[in-house]
Image (cartoon, grey):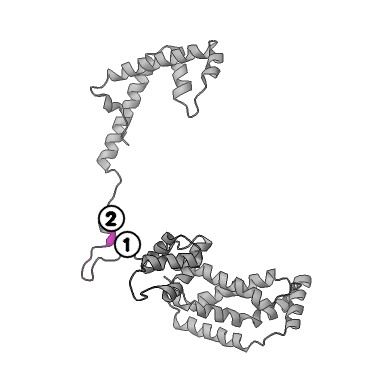
Amino acid sequence: MASIDDPQTQRANMAFIRSSMKEPLLARDHELDLARRWREQGDEKALHELVRSYTRLVVATAARFRHYGIPSGDLIQEGNIGLMQAAARFEPDRDVRFSTYAAWWIRSAIQDHILRNWSIVRTGTTAAQKSLFFNLRRLRAKIADNPSAENMSDDARRLVARELDIDPREVETMEMRLAACDQSLNATMSMDGEAEWQDVLPDNRPNPEDIVIGMRDGNMRSRWLAEALGELSPRERRIIAERRLRDEGATLEELGRALGVSKERVRQLENRAMSKLRASMMKRVSDGRDLLMEA
């Protein structure tokens, strides 16, 4: 989770907030005039006046999300981006105030930033999960049978799910996700010890000895196969190479045309060649399982 603003940043944030509160409110007609001048004439001065007048809306919206552990300066910056996006898309001919239109963009920009930075693990990827993330605490306090309990009851989860029109299992998953916190694998397991959490993670990769043995066995199988192929006739080797040793093997019909025989004859030659290969390979091992590659 992000750290709190340092003192210098806090002072800069307060200066921005104070200047935002001093910006005059716009009358409806003047607001629409500024929006038209920007949209139709590209008047940047009008755009700046329109945006500055509603930075107070950004500050107010950011304050509503201050409990998510994200620095307030970051929330305000993201809200300003949403405000500018609203100004770029606002259509003054529609019968709606700019503040009403901008509020959605500001809130969306701030919420997206929180979801990206609240945890290193992506918290919400769908609209339902996003709504659940920002409303679970409020709904739990509103309808849970025991708000002070560590976990919600099944009935409370069903009520929350019904309120947001989602699956109750998603409520349980988000509940556990919000109750947990990110923890570094380099963190020590105890206050007075040096062992880290990553020290107890199992390593499922093969050890160096297994790797060397696997390479040796693979080379040996390749040599056996090359020797067995050498015992086939040229036509049989061609069929095996075209049918078995390529990513996309040739069809029986294609090989039949190339060899001047029927596809049924190609199938017979292939089966005979495979039988010869099996017999040749089995001569080289005492146990047929030695020819199998380990998973």
Amino acid type assigned to the residue bearing label 2 in the image: Leu
Q: Position of residue 59 (x, y in %)?
A: 56, 81
* Residue to which mark 1 is pinned: 185
In this rendering, the answer to whether 154 lies above or below 290 is: below
Residue ranking furthest to the left: 192
Q: Is residue 2 left or right of residue 254?
A: left
Q: Is residue 71 left or right of residue 278?
A: right
Nearer to me, 180 or 187: 180
**Quarter of image, res 184:** bottom left
Mark 1 near mark 2, Cβ–Cβ under 8 Å? Answer: yes
Residue 229, visible in the rendered structure: yes
Q: Position of residue 254 (x, y in %)?
A: 55, 19
In this rendering, the answer to whether 162 lies above or below 24 is: above
Residue 69, visible in the rendered structure: no
Q: Quadrant of the C terminus?
A: top left
Mark identifier at residue 201? 2
